[in-house]
Image: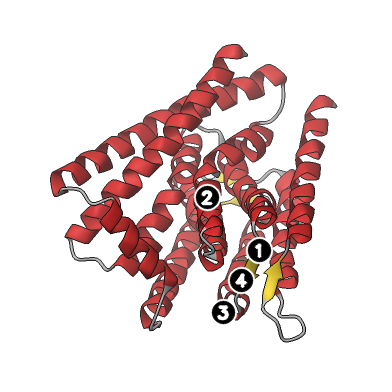
Amino acid sequence: MALPMLMIVLGLIVLVWSADLFVEGAASIARFLGMSPLLIGMVVIGFGTSAPELTVSALSAWQGNPGIALGNAYGSNITNIALILGTVALISPIVVHSQVIKKELPVLFMVTLFVIAQIYDGELSRMDAILQLGVFAVVMGWMIRAGMNQKTDALEIEMEDELEEHAMSFSQAVIWLIAGLVLLVVSSRVLVWGAVSIAQDLGVSDLIIGLTIVAVGTSLPELASSIVAARKGEDDLALGNIIGSNLFNTLAVVGLAGVIHPMSIPVEIIQRDWPLMAVLTISLFVLGYNRNGEKGRINRLEGGALLAVYIGYTLYLINTVMSA
């Protein structure tokens, strides 16, 4: 088991590093092609930070390991809210603007309901997956249009600064893009191999491995970017990053995996993982709701509660493995 563990660690390190290479190269190329900083932030960076989940789940589906693909996507959603937002709120309380409560969170919740309606029969067909990708395209189009109609946008200002700070030539950007993409695929193969091997050695389902080790590992870019945003006082970027990532995971990651390989849905996802994902999404409404005329805020106590939920969920999964 030592070699598979080593491959998982190395795979995760290279996966996160290659995603960063890919994002910086793609963002610079987009800038050379005349794309606005706002669109680069919403589209290129949005796709880039979720590139680990996308490549790992797509490769897992292609190799016939749907448990890792599904566990990675839904586990990353749980990790994003409970572990990452909980950790960020402990570092610095997160202000939740009314726009998030009225627009982005309702979209995420509706998407969460849409997904359970598709998988409740225990199957994700290719047509289901195509519908998920179609809904994702519509949601992305709506978010981009809404962002472009805003007079001032924190993400646009942030991206302008980032692009100037990491300026590079067009040829260098192409090299970084290609190198990042190649390393993403290679590191994903190594990670999936290690995860499948450990699941086989422990005699547990690859779903459990996907929900824990793989989900946390592929969520590292979101963790890093959210902590940086919170330390800079950019609460809206930290929360927006998580909401965008969960939308991407729920629709694009699972959708692409389902197009590659239609799959059966383990009953545990319907009875255990999806309900927790839905409850955590609803909790963002409750925690971020405007109280007494003040802006909604996820304080340190509430951040600790989210973190406790993640720890409890992880311990429950570990106990499931030990008792198997």
The CA span between labels 4 and 2 is: 18 Å
Q: Neighbour class for label 2 at 10 Å: few (<14), some, many (≥20)?
A: many
Residue 118 x %, y %: 62, 60
Position of the C terminus, as image quadrant, is top right
Earlier in the chain: of badge 1 and badge 3, it is 3
Q: Name the residue under label 2.
A: 222
Q: Name the residue under label 3.
A: 99
Q: Residue furthest right?
A: 323
- Disc ID at residue 117: 1
Secondary structure at numbered mark 2: helix
- Disc ID at residue 185: none
Residue 99 x %, y %: 56, 79
| Above or below, comparing residue 259 to residue 99 in the picture | above
Q: Name the residue under label 4.
A: 105
The CA span between labels 2 and 1 is: 27 Å
| Residue at the image position 66 percent from the left and 37 percent from the top | 212
| Residue at the image position 52 percent from the left and 64 percent from the top | 234
Q: Which amino acid does label 3 sit on?
A: Gln
**Badge nearest the viewer, 4 or 2:** 2
| Residue at the image position 65 percent from the left and 48 percent from the top | 79
Residue 85 is left or right of residue 312, and the answer is: left
Residue 177 or residue 300, whichever sits in front: 300
| Above or below, comparing residue 201 to residue 216 in the picture | above
Position of the N terminus, as image quadrant, is top right
